[in-house]
């Protein structure tokens, strides 16, 4: 099959292509930095399954609102452009440093 002929195969290809990159799993407009989207990203996409004790590292980034676009599957962080962020969060319940 060619790209675009199977959504499942395309998603698998996306996941394989981005194994070592920070991929956004959740995003919200930043209340603290207007014009930015605050993103939670994990390496290679995905979170630990609910009810498990396996923790996946999560990082927060600020991405310019004009640039943020989830595309077909997810937004991939550009570490040279997007800002690693540890300040106050716009996510309800976020308490990690």
Image (cartoon, rainbow, N blue to C red):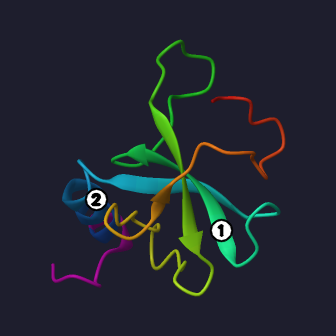
Specify the label residue 21 is tagged with: none
User: Label 1 vs label 2: CA separation?
Assistant: 26 Å
Specify the label residue 37 is tagged with: 1
Q: Quadrant of the C terminus?
A: top right
Specify the quadrant of the image occupied by residue 33: bottom right
Above or below for 91 versus 36: above
Above or below for 89 versus 68: above
Asked if the stretch drawn in magenta spans residue 7, the answer is yes
Range covered by the magenta-colored residues? 1-9
Residue 36 appears left or right of 9: right
Circle 1 packing at 10 Å, graded few (<14), some (14-19), many (20+), is: many
Residue 80 appears left or right of 74: left
Query: Nearer the viewer's eye, disc 1 or disc 2?
Result: 1
Specify the quadrant of the image occupied by residue 26: bottom right
Nearer the N terminus, badge 1 or badge 2?
Answer: 2
Looking at the picture, tell me which residue is in the foreground, 10 or 84: 84
Where residue 9 sits in the image (x, y, percent)?
A: 27, 66
Where residue 82 sits in the image (x, y, percent)?
A: 44, 66
> Residue shown at 48%/21% (left/top)?
55
Above or below for 12 versus 64: above
Read off the residue under disc 2: 12
Numbered-mark total: 2
Q: Secondary structure at mark 1?
A: strand
């Amino acid at each position: 099959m060619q790209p675009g002929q199977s959504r499942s195969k395309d998603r698998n290809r996306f996941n394989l292509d981005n194994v070592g990159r920070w991929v956004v799993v959740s995003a919200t407009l930043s209340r603290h930095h207007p014009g930015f989207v605050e993103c939670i990203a994990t390496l290679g996409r995905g979170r630990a399954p609910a009810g498990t004790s396996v923790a996946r590292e999560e990082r927060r980034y600020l991405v310019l609102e004009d640039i943020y676009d989830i595309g077909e599957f997810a937004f991939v962080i550009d570490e040279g452009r997007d800002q690693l962020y540890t300040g106050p969060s716009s996510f309800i319940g976020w308490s990690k440093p």
